[in-house]
Amino acid sequence: MLKMSLKITEEILTGRIYKMKTEEEAITFEALYEKIKENIKDTDELLKIKEAYNFAKEKHKGLMRLTGEDFITHPLHVAEIVNSLNVDATTIIAALLHEVMNNGETTLSEIEERFGSTVATIVDSITKINKLELVDDSESSAIYLRKVLVGLATDVRVLFIKLADRLHNMRTNYAINPKKQKQKAYETMAVLIPIAHRLGINSIKSELEDLCLYYTKPDVYQDILDKLNETRQELHDSLEEMQESITDILTEQGLKFKIKGRVKSVHSIYNKLSSGKKWNEIYDILALRVILESVSDCYLAVGLVHAKYRPIPNRFKDYIAMPKANMYQSLHTTVFGVDGHLFEVQFRTYEMDEFAEKGMASHWSYKEHGTKKVQNIMEQKLEMFRNLIETHEEVDDLAFAHDVTSDMLAEMIYVFTPKGDVMELPRGATPVDFAYRIHSDVGDKTVGAIVNDTIVPLNHELENNDIVKIKTNPNGSPNKDWLNFVKTSQAKNKIKSYFSKQERVFMTEKGKDILEKELRKRKLAFNEVMSEENVRKILKDLKLKDLDDIYLSIGTLRYTAGFIINLTSEAKANVEDALIEKVNKDAKNEANYKNDIIVAGMGDILVSIAKCCKPVKGDDIIGFITKGQGITVHKKACPNILDKSDRTIEVSWNYAHEQTYLTDLYIETDNNKSYLSDIIAIFTKRNVHIDAFRASEKASSFLYEVTIKVKNKEEVERIILDLEMMSFVRKVSRSR
């Protein structure tokens, strides 16, 4: 594969179909600053941007990229990309600083002190995201990473910067080894391109698609380029002639406009070929985009073009009246043009063109210029992100995968309120989904629905252009049966939340009753054990909110009443002692793993897991023949067997059999404060059994040695990711 950084443009402005750069264009802060000043006018903000650049330059001083460039060129390019999206000063500052915590030994507090809490939060989120990568190529891994990305993006600007960061890294992907090139490309396709699409940032999405195709299918990519080059002059001449013809038509009517010619992207052509079309069956390779001053001009222009060039039946699309799912607006038509070529022609306003390329990233400017309809959908879109963020910790991966698919990546429909406000919903949504999209109170009190002046059941599936009226009752409440048919995660989570609150009240009362019974059994006075001082201690030790939270933790069996009572005893030095005692009290049972591991050429033989490296299902393993003790299974990289190949034997996992395994994790924190209860909470949340827990204090840190019981390697890696997400965790590993 050629060592080149690709910058691919769809627009044919110079007679070339594709412009490919064999090296990154030189960038300086001075040149970038001039571009920034076109979007940012506030003097104080501009000074802060300069300060951020100088800060980043100092922090990255002496560091080099694999391309051989100074490291500071990367944040400069990322800032250039986000600036091209017309973002605010905060996003540009965060883009310049997004690597300083990884490379510059910079603390979060230092960033917050100099650039404010918003910038610090964005940089911290980017730093955490950049630690993550796909565990494997499976869909489950992509779902998990997508979950973390969306979950960490508490500010949608985090995603803008992450997309720009990945785009620049993909442009310089040639600098890493071929295996890593493909891994990054697959990760980009599985996680980031869907997010770019949902945010409507076509300028980034389109280039990422082409770059991913280049690295995953280089032969296919080159073949398409070669075919385009064969007809380059013919295509260019036809496009130029058609462009001149449309220009004459619109100019005669006194319309003011800008017209651009382009060819479909390599990836777009690849999709058509993949769907079964042959090269000579792809007629709409050429396209023209006409940008006008008003919506009425767009409709007038398309009529004028149709008057001269016959349109293809059923190819006219009105995305102005009914925007696409990512809020894209434009009129599309395909006509028989000059030289027998089919041309796709798009008509849009300048605001629509900006939004089509920059999507949600132009959020800060669209409110002043955009239509009310687009504003309304934008707020719904951001609410969708907020809803996923609020609930992502409460659902498992499969549930989240469904939420992502149904709420973010599914085909959308547009329905209206009786006042004409548009609502975006996934196909298959019901009046209950519609009601919760309006407001949670409306959803909770829904008792009926009228669609297009007809009463319909609440599980009725809505269609495009439906007009929906919701009937409510002040005394109404959700019905659990709604969970069987609602489509959006927003509706599901609100319904579950309603019943969860009811369940919480019941469990709180139950917990209080269990505690009182245990105190009576021990002949202890409630007021003495649960004194104000003791309650404060329990709340602090267990990080609970109030007394009801203590009752709830007992009612839900998170803690036993006896455990809570013991925390108030002076015999316990602190909660750490109690927690470790609780963890370590279970008996350890040795297991025979002969059904779970296949030993080459041997039948019924004792098989055990090595205690030195403790492999789990999914690890690369090797068997070690132990005299009188059968086969001991080690990780292949275990140092204890590296020089003993004469006593090793091939073994493999039996994936048809399920077993649990003990393995060790070593967690190092960044200061000498104890985080024992926080760490245990991570394992509790994942329902991972802790077999043993040891803590040791170092000069400036704590080291926790945790033995856990898991099903496979993937479960271990997810726990490690969860732990690495904690701000106080410095390092997590499975070996010292």
Image: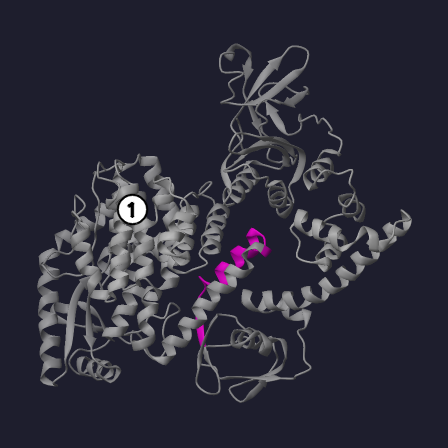
In the image, residue 137 sits, relative to residue 284, either above or below, namely above
In the image, residue 370 sits, relative to residue 680, either above or below, namely below
Q: Residue shown at 70%/37% (left/top)?
A: 577
Q: Residue shown at 75%/34% (left/top)?
A: 586
Q: Position of residue 606 (x, y in %)?
A: 68, 20
* Left or right: where 58 falls relative to 110: left
Crowdedness near tag 1: few (<14), some (14–19) or many (≥20) residues, C-alpha within 10 Å: many
- Nearest to the observer: residue 144 or residue 390: 390
Q: Residue shown at 42%/60% (left/top)?
A: 155
Question: Which residue is situated farthest in the bottom direction here?
Answer: 453
- Nearest to the observer: residue 644 or residue 307: 644
- Nearest to the observer: residue 309 or residue 405: 405
Q: Position of residue 692 (x, y in %)?
A: 67, 32
Q: Position of residue 44 (x, y in %)?
A: 27, 62
In the image, residue 389 sits, relative to residue 622, either above or below, namely below
Q: Position of residue 551 (x, y in %)?
A: 75, 56
Q: Is residue 28 visible?
A: yes
Q: Is residue 278 visible?
A: no
Q: Is residue 348 magenta?
A: no
* Left or right: where 498 falls relative to 379: right
Question: How many marks are shown on the rendered structure?
Answer: 1
In the image, residue 719 sits, relative to residue 558, either above or below, namely above
- Nearest to the observer: residue 113 or residue 336: 113
Q: Is residue 396 magenta?
A: yes
* Left or right: where 360 falls relative to 692: left
Instruction: Report the span colored magenta.
Output: 394-414
Q: Residue at label 1?
A: 56
Kindly state the secondary structure of the residue where label 1 is placed. helix
- Looking at the rendered image, the quarter that the N terminus falls into is top left
